[in-house]
Image: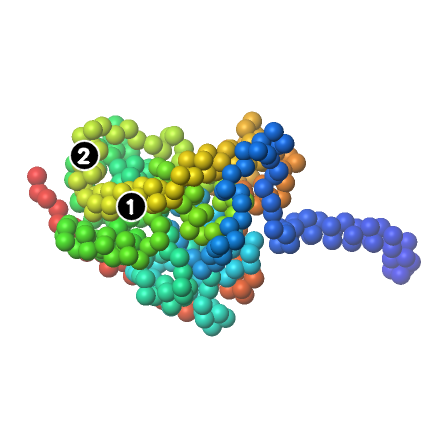
Amino acid sequence: MASKLTRRHFPLIIIYSICGLLLIIVYYRDLFISRPRLPALPASNVNEVTSLFLHDDTCKPVQQIVFLKTHKTASTTSNTIIQRYAYVNNLTFALPHTTGKFCFFQPFNRRMVSNPSAASVFNILANHARFARTEMDAVVPQATYLTILRDPIARFESVFGYYKMDKQLKLDKHPNPIEAFLENPDYYFNKRPFMYIQLKNGMMYSLGLDHHFHDNTTRVLEKIEQLDREFDLFMMTEYFDESLVLMKQILCWDTDSMMYLPKGLRKESRRFNLTDEMKAKIRAWNAADVMLYNHFNQTFWRKVQEYGNNFQEDLHTMQKSVKQVYETCIDADGSSRGRRDPRERFLALHKNASKYCHLLNERLDYFVNIARVRQDTPSTHKGRPFCKDTTPLLKVQKN
């Protein structure tokens, strides 16, 4: 009876099998995407193509990169560009043992990399980590070093809102929780809410200087001089597209590789108004980050001058290309409810969006997960070094 039933349904079984196979291929199609290309410019714009689109035969694309991912600086958008390039070009990732982040509390060391025996060195290190040049050089030798900075006042407000410090510190009933926090910031810092280390000089901390040195001007200036020697580019959040033009030149990448869709934009409900007095208090409490930002803001514009006369033209083309990609890929009237990150639900792709658009719209975890499969580096606690918070308490000023 069973054999007769099987013969009778044999054609249906074949059809269902083929359909199932097609579904699997569609689901995993991104694993087999060939190098995507930027949608062609309209014919009317062909003559506006500038040197930004021309391949520079005098340089070779850089494929050894360390991107020091700072917090709340548009670093997710920047990092997505880098990790997407690594994915498309089949480069290797130095990955943490678990999740997508290395230890927040200790400077990076090579033991933090998962499965190092599979490859003694890697092409890309771009997940959140604290800067330690010697150890990073051991993992990604002869790398180009990049990072991104943001105005310390805007970054503090972003950290406070994104990590919901008002609720963690039970200040959410206050008319302005940041104002209440700034009345006694050291006291609230010592309560150690989640990601508290990013409230005070968080960029300098991520770049390797511990909190107990942040009020030592000499040590801060020495650290800034060291960073100036060891990094190839400090990008600026406030001048993101300008930063991409410099980054493109340094890495010798093509324009397709530099395109992006914004990632991790905060909701308006998680933003706080700042008075001039509050801004002054934030600036004073984050003095090390202010010195860091001011120094590299100057070096940034020096690099722009050194770029040459084509900078403004190349910037215009970069911005025009980014705008074109956004309009080509994103449905302004849509809402991507399926995205896990609610900050990006406005990034709804057009129904017939290209593979290139789908790839641009992917988040960091997509590329990290693909790399884990490619490199046989599953997320595991096995062999993970102990990550201990050794930050000392701040001395609270008595009122």
Q: Residues within 10 Å of mark 2 (few under 14, many from 20)?
A: few
Q: Quadrant of the C terminus?
A: top left
Residue 102, compared with residue 359, is above or below; it is below
Instruction: Give percent across and percent down for residue 169.
Output: 26, 41
Q: Quadrant of residue 268?
A: top left
Q: Nearer the viewer, residue 395 or 321?
A: 321
Instruction: Give percent across and percent down for residue 370.
Output: 55, 56
Disc 2 secondary structure class? helix
Q: Is residue 60 left or right of residue 396?
A: right
Residue 385, compared with residue 321, is above or below; it is below
Q: Is residue 142 left or right of residue 284?
A: right
Q: Nearer the viewer, residue 316 or 89?
A: 316
In the rendered structure, which amino acid carries the disc numbered 1?
Thr
In the rendered structure, which amino acid carries the disc numbered 2?
Ala
Disc 1 secondary structure class? helix
User: Residue 238 has which mark?
Assistant: none
Q: Is residue 270 left or right of residue 31?
A: left
Residue under pointer 2: 280
Residue at 54% x, 33% y: name it.
Answer: 48
Query: Does residue 369 appear in the picture of this structure?
Result: no
Q: Is residue 145 left or right of residue 32?
A: left
Residue at 32% x, 66% y: name it.
Answer: 134
Marks 1 and 2, how far apart at CA:
24 Å
User: Residue 299 has which mark?
Assistant: 1
